[in-house]
Every structure is written in structure tokens, then in C-alpha cells.
Amino acid sequence: MYSQKTLGALAVGTGAILWGTIGPVISLFPDGNSFQYSAFRSAAGSLILWLIIAFSKVKTRYSRADIKPILVAGLGSGGFLPLFALGFERTGVAVASVVAIGLAPIFVGIITWIFYKKRPGKTWAIGTTLGVAGITALNWPGSDASINFAGIGFAALAAFSYSWQAIGMSQLARRHNAFQTVAPAFTVASFIQVPLTFGMSYEFLTEPILLLGAIYGAIATLALAYSLFAYGVHRIGPANAVTVGLMEPVTAATLGVTLLNESISTLGFFGILLVLIGLFIVGRPSKN
């Protein structure tokens, strides 16, 4: 039998693999549609989850104690992609990815330590160090990369948003199932993201292949992936969950090579190996 910690890590890792498919899907869309795609994904994905909850017999009532974690998770969910987009527009995808993805596990560990008096532990420290080093190697900027401090700042804020998303969902998952954890968070996210797209075109929804890609994003990369994340974060904690979530860029890089004819350097392959070792350390059962 697998331990609860191992099951949690497997759930988060599976969700992260689904997140890693977002890149190839977005590559099908014309440039300038990332905000619209994200807003549609949040709104449609949360609607799907509410429909599942409505027909489910296993659910719990929300209470006033849920308001704060819902807002924390929702603000984090709604802020990540817009802030990340502002980051990579200014400093490039490679630099923004290193900052946003690399800082998130560190931020979660610090936040849970300072605000919730929970030290992440040596396992998290070792696994996260290896994971962050691996992601840095995988996304190491080339000689032509531009360093923009405003872009780095936005990417860091994106990491900070993602950190609070994980913490808020972890608190909600203590009292509610995975669907009830994710649905309200992304409902709040929708109220943040949809207004940002006012005046922008949603014409891509008229093309069957792009509509299918948008629906896939709502079902697979949000409703299913985040439900798996919520299931896992309750069992391994937000600090470990965000570290296991580093499987996302590894998946994206792998799909980039196999589907989009991209290439990975020797340093990048070494980075993937470091990430996998880090995830194994974080996800292995405790001795006790």
C-alpha cells in the first residue's frame, strides 16, 4: 500500500504533468491570446467543477471560516498568469520561467514558516534545492537573453501569487473535497481575469481546433489537474506540493522536443535529472 504522502505526491505530479501540456496547446493559438485563453480556462473550468459539485452526493457546506482561504487561493490563482505574462514580455520566457517557477517553492516554504509556524523540514529543503537547481539548468537563458529588472519583478510576483494559491487551497482542502476546493478559487480568479480581457478578441473560439484546445484547457489542465493538486496538497502540504509541481516545466520541455521539434541542451537534460531526483526525495514515504 502506498502511504498518504506518496499518494499525495503522485496526485500533484499527475496534475503538474497535465499543466505541462498547456504550452503545446497555446502554441496553436495566434499571438496575443494568452490572457483570453486564461480567462476562458478559469471561467469554464470553474463552471464545470460547480456542475460536478451540484450533482455530487458527497459535499460539505461552506462556512465563514472558508472566506479567507477562498480569497487567498482565488487571488493567487487569478494573479499568476497576468503577472507572469508581464514578466516574460519584458525579460523573455527563459528568464521569467527561472524566476517564477524557481522562486515559488522557496516562497511557500518561507510563508508557511513565518505566518503558519510550520517549518518545511530537511526533506523539503533538499528536494527543493535540487528541483530549483534543475529548473534553472533546464531554462538557463542563452547569451542573447535580455535581463529586465521590471520583468524579473513581475515574474517574482507571479511566483508569490502561485505560492498563496497553494496555501489557500491547502487550507480549504482540510474541510472540503478537491472539487469544492478548486471551484471557488477559480471563480474568484475569473472575476480577476475576465475584466482584463475587455476589448480583446475571443474570435479564436469560432475555430473548431482552437475551441477544442480551449475546452481541453478548462477540463484537463484546470478542473482535473487542480483537483488532483488539491487532493495532494492536503496530504503533503503546500511547500512539498509546489516543489512536486516542478514536474510541469519538465513535461513542457519534453513535449516541446517530441511535438514541437524544440531542442534541449546537455545542461537541460541534467536539469531534468535533478528535478526528478528532487521530486523523488520530496515524495518518498516518511520513515515513521
Image: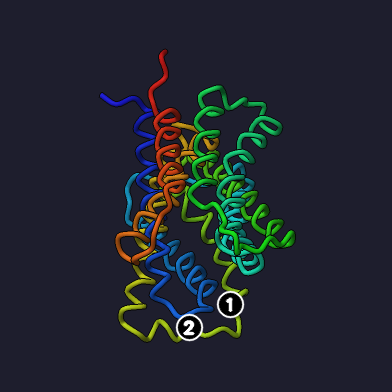
Which residue type carries mark 1?
Thr
Residue 8 quadrant: top left
Question: In front: 213, or 190?
Answer: 213
Question: Is 214 above or below relative to 276?
Answer: below
Amino acid type of disc 2?
Tyr
Q: Position of residue 32 (x, y in %)?
A: 53, 78
Give the residue drawn at x 42%, y 70%.
26
Q: Give the labeled residue for mark 2.
A: 202
Decide if residue 118 is on the left or right side of residue 4: right
- Residues packed near mark 1 inside 10 Å, few (<14), some (14 to 19) or many (20 plus): some
Q: Residue at x 40, y 37 (%)?
A: 276
Q: Which mark is residue 197?
A: 1
Instruction: Assign a secondary structure to mark 2.
Output: loop
Q: Are marks 2 and 1 in contact (CB under 8 Å)?
A: yes
At horizontal 68% and vertical 60% (from top left) the residue drawn is: 147
On the image, the x and y values in percent for residue 201 come to: 52, 85
Q: Considering the image in quadrants, where does the N terminus appear?
A: top left
Quadrant the C terminus occupies: top left
Question: How many angstroms separate mark 2 from mark 1 (CA)?
Answer: 9 Å
Residue plotted at (42% across, 35% down): 279
Q: Quadrant of residue 235?
A: top left
Which secondary structure lies at badge 1?
A: loop
Looking at the image, is 17 positioned above or below residue 143?
Answer: above
How many C-alpha atoms fall within 10 Å of the one at disc 2: few (<14), some, or many (≥20)?
few
Q: Earlier in the sequence, mark 2 or mark 1?
A: 1
- Residue 262 position in % (x across, y down): 38, 63
Compared with residue 76, is residue 283 higher up or lower down, i.e. above or below? above
* Residue 174 visible in the displayed image: no
Q: Nearer the viewer, residue 5 or 57?
A: 5
Q: Is residue 201 visible?
A: yes
